[in-house]
């Protein structure tokens, strides 16, 4: 069954399917290790987060033009709408593209026009979250934020991604305060590879409204209690966790089971579907099949995604 859902943890750059990658590389004259899409995809075997990020960032040099960003986002929105997604809040990494020599205006123009087009053609509601690359540090994040302010009406919040260990949320307190002062939503990856202290810092120092991943929060009972009491959503990505070995290899052993039993506000997302074996509907199908979740649990996960989304209460009422 296809569950109507909101996808809240999705990197638009992680939806770059191999055929798209090859077409963009040819169009823009960018070298790839192979131009055979199947051969490219066959290389997507990862030991950890960093080994994925290395391939991911290298692939992203193919994205150059407004059309590239438009087609990428539209492709994702159409594919996910067909898989039940009614609302998407997707991240993009401005620093990756700026560092590849692409103007921020080009990136925004492509993404924003795709959001508008998909709303009209497939009826999906979508908004954009601007994500900082934590391994580039706080000064670069602040500089990027200032560069993005002229486009303030084209994104609804800020996020934090990339290499987690060694780059704790505390480094980004100032840029998150700047975002809060602009009335932006705030989320951050925490507890994917980093320990519970990363989740505490994201909550206490960055003021995040949702935690992206949050798996390692389960190691700290006081943190679990906080997440439960304050109904702080976790955007959990089961297929991603298996692919990046941040969860046990068998999905049946995924911490999602315990998160549900602990009464946490868990949602399901795909993270980087071009790399990890599927979109949000594929994640739902996998957890149903491998974890034996009941239809009541699956319906709860789907409903949670609308509860956790940054839509208005009026819009939310229409989905729930
Ligand atoms: N960037 C893209 N996917 C990511 C993930 N799963 N964790 C951190 N940064 C990312
Ligand atoms: Zn992610």
Image (cartoon, helix red, strand yellow):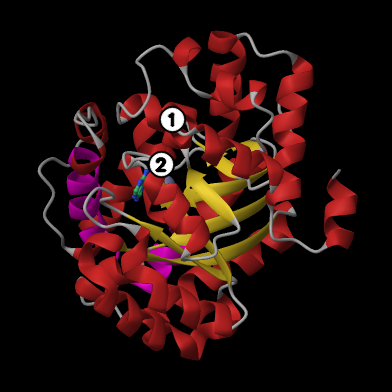
Q: Which residue range is magenta in the image?
A: 51-72
Residue toward you, 45 or 251? 251
- Tell which residue pokes out farthest to the bottom in this image: 150
Residue at point 62%, 37% (across, down): 225
Residue 16: x, y in percent? 37, 48
User: Circles 1 and 2: CB distance less than 8 Å?
Assistant: yes
Element type where label 1 sits in the image: helix
Query: Crowdedness of circle 1 by 10 Å Cα count: few (<14), some, many (20+)?
Result: few
**Quarter residue 97 falls in:** bottom left
Residue toward you, 45 or 71? 45
Residue 90: x, y in percent? 53, 57
Residue at point 29%, 71% (across, down): 95
In the rendered image, the quadrant that contains the N terminus is: top right
Residue 60: x, y in percent? 26, 57
Which residue is tagged 1?
219
Residue 62 falls inside the magenta stretch: yes
Which residue is tagged 2?
196
Prevailing secondary structure class for the magenta stretch in the rendered image: helix
Residue 189: x, y in percent? 42, 51
């Amino acid at each position: 069954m296809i569950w109507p859902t909101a996808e809240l943890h999705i990197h638009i750059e992680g939806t770059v399917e191999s055929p798209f990658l090859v077409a963009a590389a040819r169009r823009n004259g960018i070298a790839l290790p192979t131009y055979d899409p199947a051969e490219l995809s066959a290389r997507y075997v990862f030991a950890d987060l960093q080994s994925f990020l290395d391939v991911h960032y290298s692939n992203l040099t193919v994205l150059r033009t407004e059309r590239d960003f438009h087609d990428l986002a539209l492709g994702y929105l159409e594919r996910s709408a067909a898989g039940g997604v009614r609302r998407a809040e997707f991240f993009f990494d401005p620093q990756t593209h700026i560092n590849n020599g692409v103007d921020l205006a080009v990136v925004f123009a492509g993404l924003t026009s795709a959001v508008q087009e998909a709303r009209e053609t497939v009826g999906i509601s979508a908004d954009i979250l601007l994500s900082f690359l934590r391994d580039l540090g706080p000064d670069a994040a602040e500089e990027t934020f200032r560069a993005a302010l002229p486009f303030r009406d084209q994104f609804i919040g800020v996020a934090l991604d990339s290499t987690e260990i060694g780059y704790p949320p505390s480094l980004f307190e100032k840029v998150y305060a700047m975002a809060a002062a602009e009335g932006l939503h705030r989320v951050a990856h925490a507890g994917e590879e980093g320990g519970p202290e990363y989740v505490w810092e994201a909550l206490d120092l960055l003021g995040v409204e949702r935690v992206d991943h949050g798996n390692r929060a389960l190691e700290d009972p006081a943190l679990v209690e906080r997440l439960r009491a304050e109904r702080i959503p976790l955007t959990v990505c089961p297929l991603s966790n298996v692919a990046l070995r941040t969860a046990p290899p068998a999905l049946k052993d995924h911490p999602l089971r315990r998160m549900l039993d602990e009464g946490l506000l868990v949602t399901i997302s795909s993270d980087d579907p071009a790399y990890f074996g599927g979109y949000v509907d594929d994640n739902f199908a996998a957890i149903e099949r491998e974890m034996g979740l009941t239809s009541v649990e699956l319906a709860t996960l789907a409903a949670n995604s609308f509860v956790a989304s940054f839509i208005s209460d009026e819009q939310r009422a229409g989905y729930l």
